[in-house]
Image (cartoon, grey):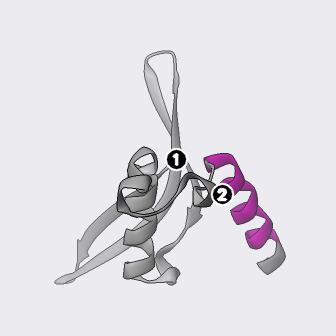
């Protein structure tokens, strides 16, 4: 699971979106699945989540002990529950 930062330019403006995604291999192809569009959460929150997911094994070095670490599976369950509740 990772946060994908996508930028697009249209009519002289630059648009940025953040997508929570997972990827897997099927044969020789890489399949990307978008779990959630997290752009409405704001740039700071999206970048923080991106950092946390990219550095899960090193979070202890910055003062987050193993008891506070999140599991990717737990995060996915929580996000799916919250998106269903909002739908």
Q: Residue furthest top?
A: 27
SS class, disc 1: loop
Q: Residue at x 53, y 45 (%)?
A: 22
Residue receiving disc 1:
1
Please say if the residues under marks 1 and 2 sit with CB atoms less than 8 Å apart: yes
Q: Residue at x 38, y 80 (%)?
A: 44
Q: Nearer the viewer, mark 1 or mark 2?
A: 2
Q: Position of residue 69 (x, y in %)?
A: 57, 56
Magenta span: predominant SS is: helix
Q: Position of residue 66 (x, y in %)?
A: 56, 52
Give the quadrant of residue 70.
bottom right
The answer to if 83 sits in the magenta stretch is yes
Q: Earlier in the sequence, mark 1 or mark 2?
A: 1
Q: Using the image as rendered, state which of residue 50 and residue 28 is in the foreground.
A: 50
Q: Residue at x 74, y 71 (%)?
A: 83
Q: Residues within 10 Å of mark 2 (few under 14, many from 20)?
A: few
Q: CA distance from mark 1 to mark 2?
A: 10 Å
Residue 75 is tagged as: 2
Q: Using the image as rendered, state which of residue 59 and residue 35 is in the foreground.
A: 59
Write the start and end of the magenta stretch as one range.
72-84
SS class, disc 2: helix
């Amino acid at each position: 699971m990772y946060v994908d930062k996508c930028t697009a330019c249209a009519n002289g403006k630059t648009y940025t979106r953040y997508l929570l995604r997972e990827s897997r291999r099927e044969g020789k192809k890489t399949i990307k699945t978008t779990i959630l569009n997290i752009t409405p959460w704001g740039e700071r929150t999206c970048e923080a989540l991106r950092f946390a997911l990219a550095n899960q094994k090193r979070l202890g070095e910055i003062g987050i002990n193993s008891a506070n670490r999140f599991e990717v599976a737990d995060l996915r369950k929580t996000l799916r529950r919250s998106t269903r509740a909002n739908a």
